[in-house]
């Protein structure tokens, strides 16, 4: 079975947790240690990516360190074609649907597609939209942010992703966001999807994670929590237990 197929099957049983590691935020050995703790805590995959990366080497070294410390699938979450790594298992071949810059909608994909074919990375099609406040991802991605209460637009993007044949849909408030995507938006989008819904940004604690899972998120992403939490294993274990309830 493909990585995407395995994830889809697992989401039919419970809400999953993915850990997002930004190579720009810690040294590779630290990323490897965090990945190990993530697996021990019950995460289902490690995502690697960020909005402020500077080199492919940075990504390669981080991915290799993670692979040395975990058996979880490592999925790239790239901001551009030059940040792909042959050492990963898969990549979210994602279109930032509400970007004003066509590079993030399709042009970077054209550049990166030959690398994906040569390397054997599994491409996982995903529609990606950024909701207020958006943070660095919204600024770097030159995004027309979806308003926090504009559920109709969010549903429209979700349906468009579904009808375009994408395998996943990601609602993102931005790493470090003071407020996450609302429960109402999540539940309304989920009602219109027949593909897994990923939610990330501003999810730092057990209660918030539980709310997003109950609202309809199939996969919860945490990133900033991994960078700042002193007792990471306990924090992740609590979050993962909460979303599986």
Image (tube, grey):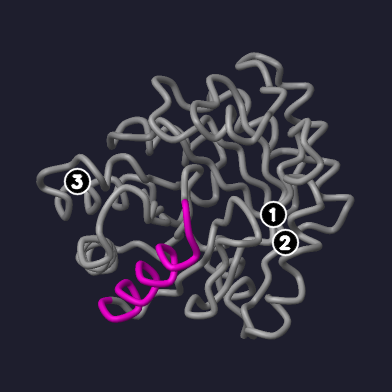
Under circle 2, the secondary element is strand
- Dot placed on the residue nearer the N-terminal end, 3 or 1: 1
| The disc label shown at residue 125, or none | 2
Place of residue 182 in the rendered image (x, y in percent of width and height, measured from the top left): 54, 23
Residue with the most extreme right position: 163
- Dot placed on the residue nearer the N-terminal end, 2 or 3: 2
Name the residue that disc number 1 marks: 94
Mark 2 Cα-neighbour bin, 10 Å: few <14, some 14–19, many ≥20: some
Q: Nearer the viewer, mark 3 or mark 1?
A: 1
Query: What number of labels is visible?
Result: 3
Question: Which stretch is magenta?
Answer: 54-69
Name the residue that disc number 3 marks: 235
Under circle 3, the secondary element is helix
Quadrant position of residue 63: bottom left
Residue depicted at 66% across the width and 16% down the height:
147
Cα–Cα gap, marks 3 and 1: 29 Å
Residue depicted at 62% across the width and 71% down the height:
4
In the displayed structure image, the side of residue 220 where residue 35 appears, left or right: left
Place of residue 56 in the rendered image (x, y in percent of width and height, measured from the top left): 50, 65
Residue depicted at 52% across the width and 78% down the height:
89
Cα–Cα gap, marks 1 and 2: 6 Å
When the figure is inspected, residue 30 is found, relative to residue 130, above or below; the finding is below
Mark 3 Cα-neighbour bin, 10 Å: few <14, some 14–19, many ≥20: some
- Judging depth in this view, the residue of 146 and 26 nearest the camera is 26
Q: Quadrant of the N terminus?
A: bottom right
Place of residue 130 in the rendered image (x, y in percent of width and height, measured from the top left): 62, 32
Under circle 1, the secondary element is strand
Q: Nearer the viewer, mark 2 or mark 3?
A: 2
Place of residue 156 in the rendered image (x, y in percent of width and height, measured from the top left): 82, 32
């Amino acid at each position: 079975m493909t990585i995407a197929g395995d994830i889809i099957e697992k989401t039919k049983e419970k809400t999953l947790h993915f850990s997002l590691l930004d190579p720009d935020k810690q040294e590779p050995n630290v990323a490897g240690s965090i990945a190990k703790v993530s697996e021990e805590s019950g995460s289902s995959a490690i995502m690697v990516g960020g909005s402020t990366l500077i080199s492919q080497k940075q990504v390669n070294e981080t991915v290799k360190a993670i692979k040395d410390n975990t058996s979880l699938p490592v999925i790239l979450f790239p901001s551009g074609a030059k940040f792909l790594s042959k050492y990963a298992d898969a990549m979210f071949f994602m279109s930032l649907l509400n970007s004003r810059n066509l590079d993030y909608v399709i042009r970077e994909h054209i550049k990166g597609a030959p690398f994906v074919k040569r390397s054997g990375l599994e491409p996982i099609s995903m529609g990606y939209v950024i909701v207020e406040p958006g943070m660095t991802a919204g600024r770097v991605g030159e995004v027309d942010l979806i308003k926090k209460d504009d559920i109709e637009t969010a549903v429209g993007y979700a349906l468009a992703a579904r009808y375009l044949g994408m395998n996943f849909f990601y609602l993102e408030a931005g790493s470090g966001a003071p407020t996450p995507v609302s429960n109402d938006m999540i539940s309304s989008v989920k009602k219109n999807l027949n593909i897994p819904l990923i939610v990330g940004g501003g999810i730092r604690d057990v209660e918030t994670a539980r709310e997003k899972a109950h609202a309809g998120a199939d996969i919860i992403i945490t990133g900033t929590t991994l960078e700042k939490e002193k007792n990471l294993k306990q924090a992740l274990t609590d979050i993962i237990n909460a979303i599986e309830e």
